[in-house]
Amino acid sequence: MQLSKRVEMLSPSPTLAISAKAKALKSAGHDVIGLGVGEPDFNTPEHILDAAITAMKKGHTKYTPSGGIPELKDTVIQKLQRDNGLAYEANQVTITVGAKHALYNAFQVILDEGDEVIIPSPYWVSYIEQVKLAGGVPVVVEGYEQNQFKITAEQLQNAITSKTKAFLLNSPSNPTGMIYYEEELREIGQICIQHDILILSDEIYEHLIYDDGVKHISIASLGEDYYKQTLIINGVSKTYSMTGWRIGFAAGPASIIKAMTDLASHSTSNPTSIAQYAAIEALNGTHEPVEKMKVAFKERRDYVVNRLNQIPGFSCQTPAGAFYAFVNIREAIAKTKGIQSTDEWAEALLEKELVAVVPGSAFGSHDHMRISYATSMDQLEKSLDRIERFVKAYG
Ligand code: PLP
């Protein structure tokens, strides 16, 4: 059967080969350490589990409105007011099957064939494929390492054409963990406003920022014109360790939200009813488990970055947020015999030392690898010992 052109354009995930190999080694009994996954290693907090159980027992196990139950929409509206200083009405919010689904539906409803979306690199893998699936054209603008992997307003301006429809902003970023500061957001936002380009602001890591006095700023909160120009994408997956529950949301212009909801009504129908009730508790309940998780992540971040920077041929800036370290390994690759690329380097590391990392190619970079520190200190220590040994043995 001939598959659709749309699907034939899809690039398989470059991380797939390495994770398949890691799994095969693990099931063959090898002690593989996975630093590839993008999810907290903590369990979903107990009070959230209880809310789900109560919801089930109360019979909340049926279809819900496509854009989510009104109680969760209200909770999201309160969250956006409380955390981001933003006021939305119910018709400006839709609940989705994870933030990924919110992004997918957003691209589907805003893009026509050939419309361009500006995506800074390094980028989260799915942006590119989702834009292509919607018939759009991803226009990648490189965020230079000297500028903490962020793009400037000037770079953005230079990438704009008559076809530019949207700009993807992800702060804190996956894979770099870097954040855009207020002045940078103002400048970038102004360009989007001037050219009437929708800002898709993926804020999924907003609560995972570690240094005192550094706070997430939603670009939509910088003024009325920013607010009108922005579609916020967010969800409960990362903050509340709820990756498997699949609840995300979008907030922004009512016409886009309505189209996204209509589209969802013909595909997913609604996000899981039980998970929606759990998400209400996550957003409204105690933040104590989140604070504890943040303390652990900060400690791990500092440990990992410090260790990485002691390895010959490695350099790693301290990420402000998320739970990834994006390490420049160009010099280490150059010294490793028979290895030309980050893909080959990551593969060799897995084979020789049983540590799985994600090569930078997955994120549009050829000099880096991504390490997730959302794993125990014990595993991190062990894996860094192994990485160090690998570099010393083969470099
Ligand atoms: N956006 C970014 C930047 C991510 O890293 C992820 C998950 O890895 C998502 C969105 C998707 O989150 P969700 O699990 O809510 O679909």
Image (cartoon, rainbow, N blue to C red):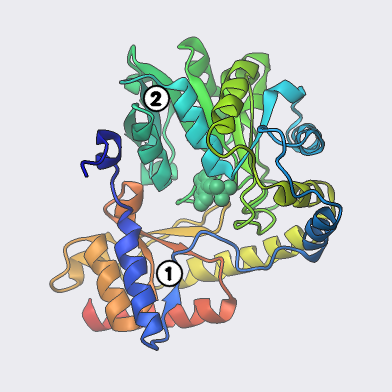
Residue 4: image location, x then y, percent: 27, 36
Nearer to the camera, 198 or 193: 198
Identify the amino acid type marked 1: Leu
Q: Quadrant of residue 122?
A: top left
Tell me the distance, in whole angstroms, between the alpha carbons under discs 1 and 2.
Answer: 32 Å
Q: Is mark 1 within 8 Å of ligand 1?
A: no
Name the outermost residue toward the bottom.
29
Say which element carries label 1: helix
Residue 54 in the figure: left or right of residue 194: right
Q: Is residue 28 left or right of residue 224?
A: left
From this view, report whether residue 271 is shown above or below residue 35: above
Along the horizontal axis of the image, is 5 left or right of 156? left
Which numbered disc covers residue 308? 1
- Where residue 156 is drawn, which disc sits there? 2
Label 2 packing within 10 angstroms: few (<14), some (14-19), many (20+): some
For the point 76% across and 36% down, the residue is 69
Considering the numbered disc 2 on the image, is that residue within a helix, a strand or a loop? helix
Query: Which dot marks residue 60?
Result: none
Q: Amino acid at mark 2?
A: Leu
Task: Classify 10 Å Cα crowding around label 1: few (below 14), some (14-19), many (20 and above).
Answer: many
Query: Mark 1 against mark 2, which lies toward the viewer?
Result: 2
Among numbered discs 1 and 2, the one appearing first in the sequence: 2
- Residue 376: horizontal and vertical position, in percent? 58, 75
Q: Residue at x 82, y 62 (%)?
A: 50
Task: Indicate yes or no: mark 2 CB to ligand 1 under 8 Å.
Answer: no
Q: Is residue 210 among what the camera can see?
A: yes
Between 176 and 254, the one nearer to me in the picture: 254
Which image quarter holds the N terminus?
top left
In the rendered view, tell whether residue 127 sits above or below residue 57.
Answer: above
In the rendered image, the quadrant that contains the C terminus is bottom left
Q: Position of residue 351 (x, y in %)?
A: 28, 79
